[in-house]
Structure formats: C-alpha cells, structure tokens
Amino acid sequence: MHHPIRLLLVTIILSGAPAVPLRADTAPILLIHGGAGDISREELTLERETAFRAALGAALEAGYAVLDDGGNALDAVTTAIVMMEDDDLFNAGRGAVFTHEARNEMDASVMDGADRSAGAVAAVRLVKNPILLAREVMEHSPHVMLIGAGAEEFAIERRMELRPPGYFRTERRWRQLLETMDKSASAEKPFGTVGAVALDRQGNLAAGTSTGGMTDKRTGRVGDSPIIGAGTYADNESCAVSATGHGEYFIRAVVAYDICARVRYRDESPVESAKVVLMEELAALGGDGGVIVLDRRGRHGFVFNTGGMYRGVIEARGRPRVAIFADDDT
C-alpha cells in the first residue's frame, strides 16, 4: 500500500472548449507522455533533463506537423510514438528494458476513435517500431492482438523493419537489470512507456501506447499498454486515453476505458474522470501512474499520482510545451 503522501494527485488542465458542434476545421491537438514515476530534480541530472525535454519537443513537433497539414489523428499518434521508440531515453523500442532472461520484449497498441478499430502486439523482440506493427494488425488483419512469434511472422509478411537483438541493448538498461536482480542494490526505477493522443481537423480522436514493460519481468509478461481499455482507448463519443504506470493495476481497473465511460455516461470532463479513476479506484488497489486524456471538444490534460511524468502538448499552431516534474508549468 502507498503512504497517503505518495498519493499526491497532480492534475494539469491545459485548455478547455465550449460545447459546440464539431466542424471540419476543428483545432488539432496532440498530447504525449514518456512515462510517469518518482521523478525528482535531485535524481535527474541536468543533462538528462535537457535531453528528455528535447526529445519530447521533437516528438510533439513531428506529430503535430501531420495534424497541421490536415492529416488524421492516427497518423499523428503513430508519428509521435515512432520518434520516442527510436530514442533510447524511453522504455519503448530501442530503449526497451530487459526481461529476467536478458531479452527485450515490447508491447504496443493503437486505437482509432472514429470506428473503435484497434490493433495491438505483445512480447515482440525484433520489431524496430512495435507501434507500427500494432497499426498493421489493425488495418491488415482480422485480429486485434498478435503476440510473440506469431506477431513477428506477421511483421515479416508485412515487410516491417526488423532489428537484431543488439539494436535494442543499451548499457543503461543492462545496468538497470543487474541492479534490479541484485536485491541489495538500490536500482534506478525505469520509467518511460510512451504514448500519444490526438484530435484532428475532422474531429476524430486516436490513441496509442508503446512500452518495453518492467525491468526483470518474466518472459511472456504482458502489461496494460497493448490491452485495449486498460492502457489505450479512443472513441469519438467519449475520449482518447494513453496510460503509463504499474500495468497490472491498470489492467485490473480497466483504467483507459473507465475514464472514457465516465466521460460518455456521466458527462464528466476527461480530467474529472481521470482524477476519479486514478485517485480513487487505482489508488485503492495500490497502483500508481498517469494518463493523458483528450476529448472531441478539445478538453485535455495530464493526471498522475506520482512525483512526475514526462509529458507535453502542442495545439493551435503553438510551440511544444513540455514538462517533467509535478510542479512544472506547461
């Protein structure tokens, strides 16, 4: 159980919009996250903080360029996530953490709010960008989720980019595995699951999430990131959500869907719904983490019950606004 002081809920409401009918020129918005956890200024060096802020800004700009050019929300989400998968700062793609058996196993999912189509992959080891494979599953298969060898066979059929195991190995993640396995050591807690939610000019929502999971996890462990309704959800009639945190709890609380269900059936704002689900339901189970939320009316924000969350937003032709610590302004 968490000490009450640790259950600090940080809510950042970045903007709102009046309840008006959506038009073809809906103002596009993109939110991203790079993981939530006990992130403190004392532990994060200035060099790494600068690197994280630059990486978040670059992902926001790449994703928003799609929206600003009239592209769809799903393209914006996958573009932003690919940027973070390719950056070994984050626990996704190239920077994925190691399993107990010293392998990298990655999970990802995407969902289109226009028709609630979805795709997901789990426990893939050789796919350069798991988020793109999840989209292939959604668009070019009759399934929602493929795992392990089956997912990688499908990746080969779809001519996806593959990489040898060495591509995903970083010394930082290797050190984290050794420290975690050494129970006497004080291991760095790796956070960095990445995600994005977007609203395009046509008023459609999309969400996506990608992760390397937990350091020292058992081979075959699957968290919430590839599970539709737990770590990812998007529905034009409610909202779009991407989550990060202790996956087992997010699965049990069906966090992403629960937030959107409250928006749809209780007429709450996305942030209000996320606050209830994280602070009351998830916390009651003993879980922690955060979410990014967005609805078709443009209401959006970040909610997390941890010390920090790598996060950012860009909207209305503005500049990327990024944050890390709980008291950061964006």
Image: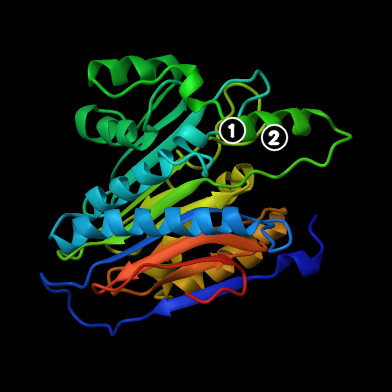
x, y percent for residue 190: 64, 43
x, y percent for residue 142: 24, 28
- Residue 164 sits in quarter: top left
Label 1 amino acid? Answer: Val
Specify which label sits upstream in the sequence, 1 or 2.
1
x, y percent for residue 130: 38, 32
Label 2 amino acid? Answer: Gln
230 displayed left or right of 187? left
Disc number at residue 275? none
Disc 1: which residue: 97
Q: Is 189 rendered above or below residue 26?
A: above
x, y percent for residue 101: 66, 18
Residue 255 in view = no
- Quarter holding the N terminus is bottom right
Image point (72%, 56%), residue name: 43
Helix, strand or loop status at disc 1: loop
Q: Is 149 rendered above or below residue 269?
A: above
